[in-house]
Image: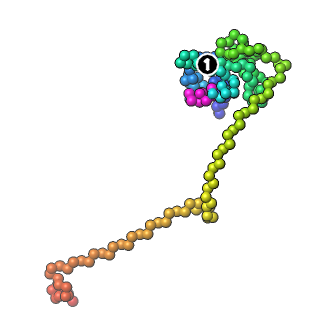
Amino acid sequence: MSKWNVFSNHGHVLLFLSRSPDARLRDVAESVGITERAVQKIVRDMQDSGVIGVVRKGRRNSYTINTDAPLRHDLEAHCRVGALVDLIVNGRAGDPAPAATSVKSAEPTSKATPPPEKAKPKPKPEPKPEPKPEPKPESSPKSESKPKPKPKPKPKPEPKKKRARKDESDDGGEQGSLF
């Protein structure tokens, strides 16, 4: 059976920080089940989009949730972050709780208020053009890269000539010769 969750890691981090606004990111990572580096990136994403605020307290950070921020997807854009956090953290639907320390309270939203215009996403930087590869000579599909030629075998050395024994003469002498 496949394993999946209704909320993304961003949602898990948001809910954890709404419950524990002074938590260390290491603790958030351990609870969510992702790396500390991934939590840092998620916090930066949510900070850049205005969903959370980060305030330095001594050597640590404290996180506040912007309850007025709309949810980012078109299907949920009519809902506010505060309503979702209130539903999950406090178990009740409706307007966000004004007394929560981790949730920045604002004027309660009414259902008659139209959702704000969707924030335009940041333009993506244009990718750098990749250098064009040099054209390859046409060849068969199997031989995309030519194999290296095999080195030519070295010629075998000629066998050494036997030395004549002292008792044999070079003139084909009679000693020891059968013919």
Which element type, helix, strand or loop, lies under badge 1? strand
Q: Position of residue 54 (x, y in %)?
A: 62, 21
Q: Is residue 143 left or right of residue 100?
A: left
Q: Say few, some or many: other residues with alpha carbon within 10 Å of mark 1 (under 14 / 14 to 19 / 20 or more).
A: few
Question: In terms of depth relative to the viewer, which is nearer, 159 or 81?
Answer: 81
Q: Is residue 13 above or below residue 121?
A: above
* Residue 39 among magenta residues: yes
Residue ID at (56%, 60%)? 145
Image quadrant in which you'd find residue 42: top right
Residue ID at (63%, 54%)? 132
Q: Position of residue 176 (x, y in %)?
A: 17, 84
Q: Position of residue 141 (x, y in %)?
A: 62, 61
Quarter of the rendering occupied by the C terminus: bottom left
Q: Which residues are magenta?
A: 36-43
Which color scheme did the rendering employ for the protein?
A: rainbow
Question: In terms of depth relative to the viewer, which is nearer, 52 or 171?
Answer: 52
Image quadrant in which you'd find residue 77: top right
Q: Is residue 161 above or below residue 142?
A: below
Residue ID at (79%, 17%)? 109
Residue 31 visible in this rendered orientation of the protein: no
Q: Is residue 128 above or below residue 74?
A: below
- Which amino acid does the dot numbered 1 rest on? Val
Quarter of the rendering occupied by the N terminus: top right
* Residue 175 among magenta residues: no
Q: Is residue 173 left or right of residue 112?
A: left
Residue 112 visible in this rendered orientation of the protein: yes
Q: Position of residue 115 (x, y in %)?
A: 80, 24
Q: Residue furthest top?
A: 99
For mark 1, what is the residue?
55
Question: In terms of depth relative to the viewer, which is nearer, 36 or 89?
Answer: 36
